[in-house]
C-alpha cells in the first residue's frame, strides 16, 4: 500500500495545495524544491503537526486525516527527524536511543543492536551528547526515531546544518538505511546532490504545489530536470558490477548488453549500481578506433537529435537492452560534419564515468 491523499494549508500569504498524490511505500522518497516552496509544510501536514491542514491522508489502509478529523501524531506510528537533532542534553547517547525504545509499542521490529550497527554508534554510546559533532548528533537523532518502531520515517533536511565534510561522512549511513530498512523514508532536501545519491523517488515541489512525482531514473534522464540547476545534462544508467581486473586497477560494469571499464571499485561482483555520465563526456565515432586512451566504446543507435543551446545539440542514444537513454552533447558543427541522423548506428566513446550507489 502507498501513502495517498491530498492536502491544503493556508498560513499568512502562503498556500499549500498539493493536489492528489501517491507516494511509494518502499525506498527513499526525496521531497525536492527551492526554499519556501512548501516542502516542510507538506511533510509537517503529512505527519499531523499542522492542525489547520485540510484534505485526506491514508497510509497502510489507515485514515490519518479526513473530513477535518485528524489521527493524533502518536497514533500514526511515524518517526520524525528535524533539521536540528533535538537530543536530550541530560542523557548520554545510549539513553537518548533507549528513550525512543521505551516509548515504543511491542512487538519491536527494529532492534537496538541493529540501529547501533546501521549507524555505527557503538563507540559513542557512553558519550555526552553535547560533545558530539553535528553529524554524530544527527545519527543519534535518526537512531532514536527508528527505535520508536515507526512504520514510516520522515526527515526534514537532516544535513542542512552540517558542513561539507560532515555531509560526506553521513551519506554512507543514510544509504545503508535506505537499502536495509523495511519502511519508507520521506526526505526533504534542496540539494540535488543528496537527491541523486539517496533517492529512489522524487517529489518535485514549486510554489506550494506538487509539480510531479517521478522515479529517480525518470527525474535524472530529463535534460532540463530541476535537479540539474544549470548544470550540464547527464544520463543515469543501471549497471551491474561484472568483474574486477586487479592487475590493471579496473572494474568492469555491465550496462544492458554493453560493458564499461572504470577505476577499481571496492564493491562485490553482482552488486547493482547507478552509472552517471555527463552528456559532454560522450563523443560519437563511426567506427571503434584502433588506438586510443579511452577505454569505453559502446555501440549505440541515434534515437533523437534536439537543439540544446545556440551552439550544441543533445543526441539521445540507445544502448541495446538498456531502458534509459545515453545522452551526448555535440556541437552543431559536428552534427553537420558527421551527417548525424536518426536511426543511424555509431560508437559512443565515453571519457568519464561517475558511480553512485
Image (tube, rainbow, N blue to C red):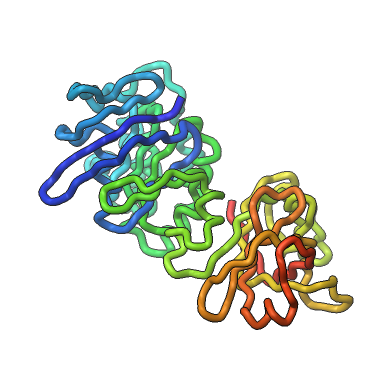
Which one is in front, 87 or 346?
Answer: 346
Q: Is residue 120 visible?
A: no
Is 24 left or right of 320, judged from the image as shown?
left
Please say if 4 is above or below 274: above
Residue 226 position by quadrant: bottom left
Q: Is residue 62 visible?
A: yes
User: What is the x, y in percent for residue 233?
Assistant: 54, 66
Is 214 left or right of 14, judged from the image as shown?
right
Is 275 left or right of 43, judged from the image as shown?
right
**Residue located at (74% from left, 50% from top):** 256
Is 93 left or right of 180, judged from the image as shown?
left
Which one is in front, 341 or 46?
Answer: 341
User: What is the x, y in percent for residue 259?
Assistant: 78, 57
**Residue located at (10% from left, 48% from top):** 12
Which one is in front, 23 or 346?
Answer: 346
Please say if 90 is above or below 263: above
**Residue located at (28% from left, 27% from top):** 56
Please say if 114 is above or below 66: below
User: What is the x, y in percent for residue 79?
Assistant: 34, 33
**Residue located at (38% from left, 53% from top):** 135
Residue projecting furthest to the top: 107
Which one is in front, 154 or 84?
Answer: 154
Amino acid at each position: 500500500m502507498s501513502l495517498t491523499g491530498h492536502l491544503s494549508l493556508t498560513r499568512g500569504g502562503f498556500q499549500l495545495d498539493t493536489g492528489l498524490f501517491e507516494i511509494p511505500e518502499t525506498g527513499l522518497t526525496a521531497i525536492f524544491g527551492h526554499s519556501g516552496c512548501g516542502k516542510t509544510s507538506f511533510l509537517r501536514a503529512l505527519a499531523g503537526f499542522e492542525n489547520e491542514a485540510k484534505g485526506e491522508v491514508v497510509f497502510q489502509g489507515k485514515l490519518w486525516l479526513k473530513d477535518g478529523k485528524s489521527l493524533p501524531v502518536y497514533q500514526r506510528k511515524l518517526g520524525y527527524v528535524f533539521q536540528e537533532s533535538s537530543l536530550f542534553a541530560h542523557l548520554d547517547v545510549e539513553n537518548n536511543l533507549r528513550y525512543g525504545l521505551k516509548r515504543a509499542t511491542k512487538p519491536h521490529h527494529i532492534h537496538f543492536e541493529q540501529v547501533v550497527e546501521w549507524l555505527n554508534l557503538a563507540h559513542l554510546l557512553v558519550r555526552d551528547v553535547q560533545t558530539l559533532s553535528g553529524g554524530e548528533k544527527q545519527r543519534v537523532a535518526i537512531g532514536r526515531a527508528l527505535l520508536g518502531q515507526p512504520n514510516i520515517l520522515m526527515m526534514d533536511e537532516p544535513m542542512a546544518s552540517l558542513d561539507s565534510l560532515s555531509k560526506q561522512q553521513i551519506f554512507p549511513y543514510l544509504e545503508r538505511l535506505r537499502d536495509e530498512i523495511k519502511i519508507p523514508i520521506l526526505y526533504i532536501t534542496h540539494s540535488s546532490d543528496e537527491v541523486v545519491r539517496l533517492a529512489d523517488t522524487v517529489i518535485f515541489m514549486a510554489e506550494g504545489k506538487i509539480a510531479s512525482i517521478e522515479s529517480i531514473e525518470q527525474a535524472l534522464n530529463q535534460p532540463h530536470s530541476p535537479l540539474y540547476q544549470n548544470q550540464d545534462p547527464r544520463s543515469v544508467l543501471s549497471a551491474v558490477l561484472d568483474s574486477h581486473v586487479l592487475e590493471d586497477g579496473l572494474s568492469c560494469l555491465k550496462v544492458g548488453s554493453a560493458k564499461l571499464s572504470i577505476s577499481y571499485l571496492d564493491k562485490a561482483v553482482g552488486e547493482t549500481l547507478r552509472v552517471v555520465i555527463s552528456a559532454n563526456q560522450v563523443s560519437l565515432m563511426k567506427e571503434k578506433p584502433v588506438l586510443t586512451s579511452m577505454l569505453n566504446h559502446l555501440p549505440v543507435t541515434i534515437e533523437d537529435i534536439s537543439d540544446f543551446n545556440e551552439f550544441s545539440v543533445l543526441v539521445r542514444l540507445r544502448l541495446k537492452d538498456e531502458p534509459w537513454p545515453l545522452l551526448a552533447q555535440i556541437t552543431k558543427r559536428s552534427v553537420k560534419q558527421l551527417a548525424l541522423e536518426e536511426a543511424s548506428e555509431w560508437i559512443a566513446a565515453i571519457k568519464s564515468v561517475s558511480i553512485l550507489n
